[in-house]
Image (tube, grey):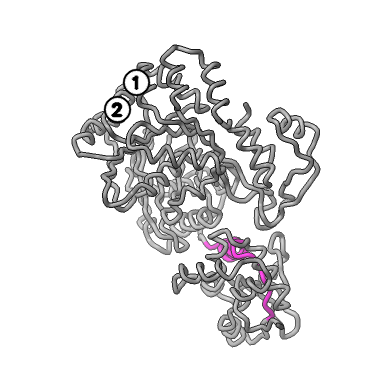
Amino acid sequence: MPIGKNMRLGDLLVESGIITSEQLAQTLEEKSPDQKLGDLLVQKGYVTELQLIEVLEFQLGIPRVTLFNYPIDSALLKIVSKEFAKRHLVLPLRKEGNKLYVAMADPMDYFVINDLRLSTGFQIEPMIAAKDEIIRTISRFYDVDEFGFEFTNNNEPENVNDPTIEDDDSPVVTLVNQILRQAVIQKASDIHIDSMETKVLVRFRVDGRLRNERNLPKNVQGSLITRVKIMANLDITEHRVPQDGRIKLSMENRQMDLRISTLPTIFGEKIVIRLLDLTMAQNDISRLGFEEENLEKFKRLIKRPHGIVLLTGPTGSGKSSTMYSALSRLNNEDVNIITIEDPVEYQVEGINQIQVNPNVGLTFAAGLRSILRQDPNIIMVGEIRDRETADMAVRASITGHLVFSTLHTNNSLGTINRLKDMGVEIFLIASSLNGVVSQRLVRQICRDCKEEREATEREKEIFSNYGMNVDTVYHGKGCSTCDMTGYKGRTALHEVLVMDDEIKQALLNNKSMMEIRDIAVKNGLTFLIEDGLKKVEKGITTTEEILRVALD
């Protein structure tokens, strides 16, 4: 059957064999009226943006363009307004005679093409570009020099009492909004605003790595910091002590929760903004990166009626996401779930959530004591930080409650020693602890530039140490989708220790940790590095990433 230009995108993808009819039908059923099919297919992981582009390029004969370092004719920006470009994701590239070549995220949107033709007077020649690339390029070209600051090397900060600092169209409000928007577009987890001696440095943490986003002149420092403080309801006159605040806002069609932390440094205040995308709260534990065997173990752990399940790992290793996913799976009308957190990260319908407040004596331990009077089935404690909280959690678990919590340890077996160091008795650990999940996050290879290469001798040696053989591995060569890094997105490595009867008996008999480790391995414990090497074998990540976070 010939494929015509008027064929719908879903049918094109099915015809090309990239998705199945069932996947298309399911996605169409979930799609909201204002959502584009292509965006939802990418979000669900059925296709990559590059696959979408390649299908349209091949089937419709529309050429593809990469905007990374593309020599855009800035004079053309005047004939397509910034508002139109952002609303419809289009960008004028060049003109030849009466033809205007335009990069579009959706080159099948004939209404937009017609609007452009009428408003510019040119014949429009659409070219396909990745959505994120277009958004980034629009910001880079349209937003330049729009702030109205005098960008000088003068080290004197601006007047922070300027009444226009809260006006929606003031330069500093525009600047802050643009920084936030760029961070959301790039899926950054944190924004760092660093006050240096001669400049202000703005950095984004993307996929776990910090990278410079822009340098700002020193004279915008005062108004920039004041604007962020005003948004977070902080004291703008206090510069000598750290402050914490929170902002909720909607940006790029996403509900964002921003945590603001200020810190006085010798050159002025440093601000870190943690971004939580409330619409991306992960509810499906099967999409957290668990290998099949570990997923079954974890499901069995969270189905138990009582006991403690601990999630361990450093800050920013995704422990909270895994815990919320488990709670969401267990959340139904016949259970009473109560959490005590610092801070409450995601608000979940049907779960009673408490915010720690040490100023009024509401600590983890005090809150946990009160929770036990509220007839709970499942309790989540944000973090076990001291002996009192550990004792309360153990007491809750042996009186018939299922308790979830987090702990900062390097691996699953180290958790037993950590609880011992806190003063928890061995017999209480043996009777209350169901299992431990140790977790790390690693970057995934970009699906758009992934290619195979021969494994090095060092890689073959590492794999053979764990009884695995590989001849080839994968890496990302770098493309515009991943900002030439070779990585896009993150996945988790897991180490799931189930406290079975044999391990509990060994604990009660005061066996050494080495003997307990041997029992755990015999009973199927897979270490973090082994879980990572399986993901390298499958082409999900690279050996370098595994060794960076899980060196045994």
What type is the residue that disc 2 sits on? Ile
Which span is picked out in magenta? 125-146
In the figure, 23 relative to 352: above or below?
A: below
| Relative vertical location of residue 36 with respect to residue 537 in this rendering, above or below | below
Cα distance in 3D space between marks 1 and 2: 9 Å
List x then y, in percent, for residue 335: 27, 46
Quarter where residue 515 is shown: top right
Specify whether residue 141 is painted magenta. Answer: yes
Q: Residue at x 35, y 26 (%)?
A: 432
Whether residue 116 appears in this view of the structure is yes
Residue at x 21% of width, y 39% of height: 375
Q: Is residue 252 left or right of residue 541?
A: left
Say whether residue 144 is left or right of residue 50: left
The crowding category of the residue bearing disc 2, from other C-alpha atoms within 10 Å (few below 14, some 14 to 19, many at least 20), is some
Q: Pick whichever of labels 1 and 2 is earlier in the sequence.
A: 2
Seen from the viewer's position, the closer of residues 227 and 479 is 479
- Give the number of marks: 2
Image quadrant for the C terminus? top right
Q: Please tell me whether residue 507 is drawn above or below residue 458 in the rendered image.
A: above
The answer to whether residue 41 is above or below residue 391 is below
Residue 3, x across and y down, in percent: 69, 81
Q: Which percent across, then down, holds residue 401?
A: 29, 34
Residue at image coords 37%, 29% = 384
Residue 398: numbered disc: 2
The three-letter code of the residue at mark 1 reads Leu
Quarter of the image where one finds residue 448: bottom right
Q: Is residue 272 magenta?
A: no
* Dot 1 and dot 2 residues touching (CB under 8 Å): yes
Q: Secondary structure at mark 1?
A: helix
The residue that label 1 is drawn on is: 428
